[in-house]
Image (cartoon, helix red, strand yellow):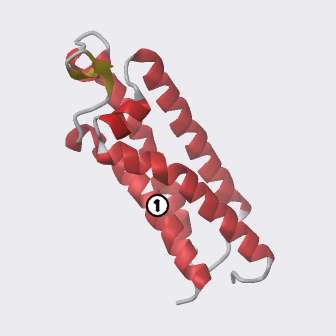
């Protein structure tokens, strides 16, 4: 297995990780939190509107679409629509995290202060997967991808 295929697999794995975070976050996490006087204050404790903030993380499930595209073309170089689909998912995820922050949840505090390993993994995977996709595009231009 060559370096191009390893990069392609790594990119697909990160997309699958973010997709799984989106699908499973409400079930496996305590939800978004803000710093409180006695420790973290979880948004689910707000009965009026805070309970749906964790639902905004479910937008990460959209990354399953570019994951499927990459798995279908594992050895081949990325094509334009693959980058476009990734970019759309990236914008949707970032927008939903901003919306969550405006309502109740402190995203970085929840991921690394509480800590919430699922959210932390998704936040780290966002820029790393973008970097791997760029590497795949550059490698394809140099003739390393099929």
Of the pair 113 and 105, the residue shown nearer to us: 113
The residue that appears at 42% across and 60% down in the rendered structure is 16
Q: Secondary structure at mark 1?
A: helix
Q: Residue 46: x, y in percent? A: 25, 13
For label 1, the crowd category at 10 Å Cα-Cα, with few meaning under 14, some 14 to 19 and many 20 or more, is many
Of the pair 141 and 68, the residue shown nearer to us: 141
Q: Is residue 146 visible?
A: yes
Of the pair 19 and 39, the residue shown nearer to us: 39
The residue that appears at 60% across and 52% down in the rendered structure is 86
The residue that appears at 49% across and 70% down in the rendered structure is 10
Q: Residue 84: x, y in percent? A: 68, 51
Residue beneath label 1, please?
A: 14
Of the pair 65 and 35, the residue shown nearer to us: 35
User: Height in image: 73 above or below 124?
Assistant: below
Q: Is residue 78 visible?
A: no
Q: Write down the quadrant of residue 41 in the picture.
A: top left
Q: Residue 102: x, y in percent? A: 47, 17
Q: Residue 91: x, y in percent? A: 60, 39
User: Height in image: 43 above or below 94?
Assistant: above
The residue that appears at 37% across and 24% down in the rendered structure is 105
Can you say which quadrant of the picture contains the C terminus?
bottom right
């Amino acid at each position: 297995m060559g370096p191009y295929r390893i990069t392609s697999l790594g990119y697909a794995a990160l997309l699958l990780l973010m997709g799984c975070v989106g699908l499973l976050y409400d079930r496996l996490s305590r939800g978004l939190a803000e710093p409180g006087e006695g420790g973290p204050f979880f948004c689910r404790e707000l009965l009026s509107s805070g309970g749906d903030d964790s639902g905004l993380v479910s937008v990460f499930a959209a990354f399953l679409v570019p994951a499927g595209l990459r798995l279908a073309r594992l050895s081949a170089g990325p094509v334009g629509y693959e980058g476009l689909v990734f970019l759309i998912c990236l914008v949707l995820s970032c927008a939903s995290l901003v919306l969550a922050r405006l309502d109740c949840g402190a995203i970085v505090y929840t991921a690394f202060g509480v800590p919430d390993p699922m959210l932390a993994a998704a936040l780290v995977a966002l820029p790393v997967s973008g970097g791997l996709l760029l590497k795949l595009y550059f490698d394809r231009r140099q003739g390393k991808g099929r």
